[in-house]
Image (tube, rainbow, N blue to C red):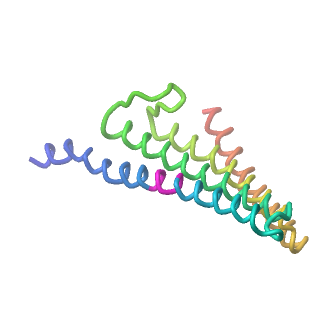
Amino acid sequence: MWKRILESGKAIALLPSLSLFVGAVFLSFYGIYILLESLYKAFTDEIARDSTILATKFISVMDIHLLSVVLYIFAVGLYELFVGKLQVPEWLKIENIDQLKSKLASVIVLILAITFTKKFVEWKNPVDTLLFGLAVSAVIAVLIFYYKIKSEH
């Protein structure tokens, strides 16, 4: 009986997969909302036309949409790993946990780069920006090092 329960446990992965998908859809709509709000303000408020403000808003939109895609990739990945195969493009097919972690790492690098760019554009305190950049660089270096070592094994 216990074996049968554990073997049917793949349904447990449905809930996280579904919740990640719902989060991805929500973030997509939220990104569109922020974009439309920014465009409206740019046309109606002279202060909102400042290039720094616009750049920060549009970088935020990219960040939100990228996070939405990450959630979608993970929703698909969990489903494919634990429930069943999906008709998705070849680059999105996940066959093991390492592939899923690798996709996450590469997207984390991209999100960190976008976040740093946003902080750089805002440029309020040079020392804070430098320290933030160093922290981002350290995380990226660790991820690259980890996957370089992992690929050699």
Residue nearest the observer in this picture, 32 or 18: 32
Could you tell me which residue is drawn at 80 percent across and 58 percent down? 55
Residues rendered magenta in the picture:
23-28
- Locate residue 98, reporting x and y percent: 51, 39
Give yes or no for residue 27 being in the magenta stretch. Answer: yes
- Locate residue 94, reporting x and y percent: 46, 34
Residue nearest the observer in this picture, 139 or 13: 13
Say if 108 sits above or below 122 in the image: above
In the current view of this chain or complex, which residue is farthest to the right? 126
In the current view of this chain or complex, which residue is farthest to the top? 90
For the image, the number of numbered tags is 0
Quadrant of the image occupied by residue 35: bottom right
Say if 148 sits above or below 49 in the image: above
Magenta segment, prevailing SS (helix, strand or loop): helix
Give yes or no for residue 19 being in the magenta stretch. Answer: no
- Locate residue 46, reporting x and y percent: 83, 68
Residue nearest the observer in this picture, 79 or 138: 79
Left or right: where does residue 147 sit relative to residue 86?
Answer: right
Residue nearest the observer in this picture, 105 or 2: 105
- Locate residue 138, reporting x and y percent: 76, 57
Say if 39 sits above or below 45 in the image: above
Quadrant housing the C terminus: top right
In the current view of this chain or complex, which residue is farthest to the front? 44
Could you tell me which residue is drawn at 79 percent across and 60 percent down? 54
Could you tell me which residue is drawn at 33 percent across and 40 percent down? 82
Left or right: where does residue 117 sit relative to residue 90?
Answer: right
